[in-house]
Amino acid sequence: MGATTSSRAGAHLQTLIDDVLAGRGQLLPQAETLPPAAYISDNFFEVEKQRIFMREWLCVGHVSQIPAVGDYFPFDLFDELFVIVRAPDRIRVMSRVCPHRWAPLVSEPGNAKFFSCPFHAWAFALDGQMLGAPLMDRVTFDVHSCRLPDYRTEILDGFIFVTFADDTPSLQEKLARFSDHVGKFRLGELVTGFVLDYDLAINWKIIVETFMECYHHIGAHVETFEKFYPARACSVEDGEKTWTVGHAPLRANVPDDSGDAGFPLFDNLTTEERREFRLYLIYPMHLVAVFPDRVGWFCLQPEGPKRTKLQTTLLVRPEARDDPEFDAKIRKERDYFIEFNDEDIAVNEKQMRGAQSRSARAGRLCDLEKAIWQLADYIRAKIAEPC
């Protein structure tokens, strides 16, 4: 019985993979979404985990979260318990699991001179090296040979990335053109305005797709976006192998500052940059929205095909904090983000319910959903790679 069930599950997964790969080579005018089962299948999520997430660079933070030596915060991703810390030498992403009997060293953000396990007080330096273990001199144990595992880490434009793979090419190689594209916004110098946390019963791809397409302005965001950024005027560039960008321009008959939130503008903006916001996706799921005076960063933590944690962060120029009205402007912008996030969540939850219907099929894409077509091609390419 068990073998038969396993065989059936394997056959169903292979059928789904074949259905996903059948869409390779589609041109945008004829393109369809991935099959709905690709958004709800436990087995397909495991394939994504092994062939995408375990091989790619994944964003886990921004330098503004840990400005001083000793600052740290926890971050969980695919059952790995990280601590991201500004050590004396550099920013590190390490395991926060004590190697003694596996208790997490920290559970909340903070600042420390060293990490101490809450279970038996084993101590570790900020670079992961063990400092001491009470009473372990009674047994054979070498303190100096014990340290916290350290993961490959790179910082790109202020964002902290980690990879589980030893052979993944450097971010600097893969994303040089991205850094050129966003250079004038000086993302690495920005500071945090606010953070919103969500625990969503939504597949990670649906969140990415909705972030990157403006077609849904006409339905989900009639007042929040369509009024100022009409869907019909939006576009997505042809994109690169590792990232893509979309443009949402203001209506022609509204003033240049209609999309501002009252924070200091980025320097040397062109007329086009002054009158639009940009949507960036670094594959598979690093999402950044750049407005003329602020940046919205959406950090995803997929926990299964039907569960994703989402953290939405507003980043602004440091001098924004000098404004006596800064707190009021932050509250207003926070309310705005909550409003349009709630609108997206509402329609995404409906999508997830519909995707589980036996009548659900791959859907035809509009040209305004070019980024969804691009993401689907990226996923197909990764799924087709050998294990």
Image (tube, rainbow, N blue to C red):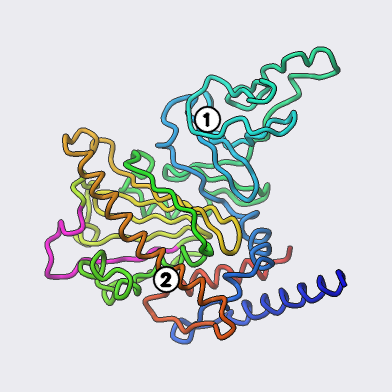
Which residue does the image show at 62% across and 82% down from the upper left?
22
Give the vertical position of 133 relative to 47 (above or below): above
Is 263 positioned to the left or the right of 290 in the image?
Answer: left
User: How far apart are the two marked residues, 2 and 1, measured between alpha carbons?
Assistant: 36 Å
Q: Nearer the viewer, residue 328 or 158?
A: 328
Q: Residue at x 53, y 42 (%)?
A: 154
Residue at image mark 2: 238
Residue 250 magenta-highlighted:
yes
Q: Is residue 35 left or right of residue 318?
A: right
Instruction: Decide whether residue 50 is among the magenta residues.
Output: no
Residue 267 position in % (x across, y down): 23, 46
- The answer to whether 345 appears left or right of 87 in the picture is left
Where is mark 1, residue-wise? 90
Asked whether the residues under the numbered discs 2 and 1 touch, taking CB atoms below 8 Å apart as contact, a structural biologist would say no
Highlighted magenta segment, given as a residue range = 244-260
Q: Residue 185, which numbered label?
A: none
Asked whether 173 or 298 is in front, the reply is: 298
- Between label 2 and label 1, give the one nearer the viewer: 1
